[in-house]
Amino acid sequence: MDYKDKYSEYYQQIPSDITNYKGNAGKIAIGYTSDLDVVVKWDTKIFAELIDIYLKQTPFLQDNDSIDSMEALVRIVSYYMIHGLGGEVNLSNFDVCMDIEKRFETEFALGGTGAQSAVALAAVGFNSIVHITDMSKEVIRLMDGKGLKIITKDGVTPIIEGVTSELPVRHIIFQYPKGEKILINGVEYETPVSNRLIIDYDQIHKYMPIEIDFLNYCEINAKSLYAYSISGFNAIVDTNIIKNKLDDLAAHYSRLKKNNPNCIIYLEDAHYLNPEVKELLFTGLARYIDILGMNEEELIEQTRRYGHSIDKNSLSSVLAGLAVMLAKYPVKGIVMHTKDYSMYYGSGIKGINIEKGLTLGNLMSGTRAKTGRYGSYLECEDTLELPLSEVGISFAKQLSEIDTDKCVHIVPSKYMEHPKYTIGLGDTFVAGFLISLIKTE
């Protein structure tokens, strides 16, 4: 059976969803991190000059690679470019930060999955309770005016009340466009797909502090929480730190679930600087998590560590990879988002329209890719006019011919050959999916 396009139908439900959400006592809680993204304006000429100066070998990438020099920067960025990959890499040398900002034109943007998801939700009309780690004036300026609330010792507080005089945490982001050509030692390479690399000069998120007031609020008010979206563990590199944090968080999620078994806990994956930290996190939290979210690259990389190779162009291969993940981490379901489609794989969740979540996630992330902004309701309407991905349509059609005992949904993405923005698309997708978790009964 061919895919039935329900983008307009679900889009038109958003105003009534907002009315119901604002009329009820329920809330969405989102945590845990924020930062200031330093977005590099791509300049072909400048990067070519850097290659000539610093790159004397074919680019390569090692496990736990870190950037400590301009040579390492150019090697690693080039590797990600020629493979069309997105990811995150640690930066240990502040002089490299300064060199990048001296050579390239840059602009500031909001960073952090939790922070971006909260602002993206607010842009279409859904306010949330949010926990963030960087409350510098630069970050708060990007989040204020959206109706977002934080939790302090005084209770629920407008986010502007939390601003500090601390310097912002900087994450430098390179976006490379599809078709970009680079010349390395006489060999020309072409970037196969638009993507981005996040480079972290960041000590705070190595420890990822979480305020006890926020955790207590979520537990005490668990019955009013529709959903609890968590992320931001990926910058932790010390396994002892994640082990200690897991002791506290596992107890926290256990108490929250006891108070409200219907609150959906959604953990969004990311590129982890230490894969062992990811393994400990997923293993330690799987029993409490309802939905594990990730992109295609994260699925491929994680299953590779278990000796399973995925052909991303084969639906049966992707489904097999998801089965491996679900067996390893028995959550209710996995949400995977790609440039061509989004998919849910697992068990059905009573009262949740999963297809709606995938569709609105695609719509909102597509709007950000198209405009470079967290789209308003009206801006999302313009995205409806974009065509559906042919790859996504093909996968959805193939799904109808596959016999499976799992609940599986595939929704083709709104496709753009050359997106304006590749930053925060997964974070914005999460925001759209969260809308489907708001029960209005």
Image (spheres, rainbow, N blue to C red):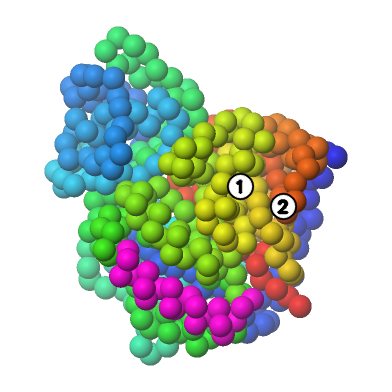
| Residue 2 image-quadrant placement | top right
Reply above or below: 190 against 77. Answer: above
Q: Mark 2 highlights which residue?
A: 406
Residue displayed at 32% across by 50% down: 274
Q: Is 341 on the left or on the right of 103, as rendered?
A: right
Q: Nearer the viewer, residue 9 or 260?
A: 260
**Any mark on residue 140, and which?**
none
Q: Nearer the viewer, residue 425 or 247?
A: 247
Q: Position of residue 85 (x, y in %)?
A: 43, 34
Residue farthest along the top direction in this orientation: 186
Residue displayed at 16% across by 36% down: 69
Reply above or below: 95 against 15. Answer: above
- In the image, the segment drawn in magenta is 242-262
**For residue 79: magenta?**
no
Considering only order in the chain, which callout, 1 or 2, is on the residue closer to the N terminus? 1
| Residue 155 image-quadrant placement | bottom left
Assign the C terminus to one quadrant of the image: bottom right
Q: Position of residue 313 (x, y in %)?
A: 61, 30
Do callouts 2 and 1 mark residues in contact (Cβ within 8 Å)? Answer: yes
Q: Is 237 on the left or on the right of 286, as rendered?
A: left
Residue displayed at 63% across by 84% down: 25
Reply above or below: 7 against 309. Answer: below
Dominant SS in magenta: helix
What amino acid is found at the position of numbered circle 2 in the picture? Lys
**For residue 251: magenta?**
yes
Assign the N terminus to one quadrant of the image: top right
Q: Is 92 on the left or on the right of 399, as rendered?
A: left
Q: CA distance from mark 2 to mark 1?
A: 9 Å
* SS under mark 2: loop
Tell me the crowding category of disc 2: few under 14, some 14 to 19, or many 20 or more residues within 10 angstroms, Cα based. Answer: few
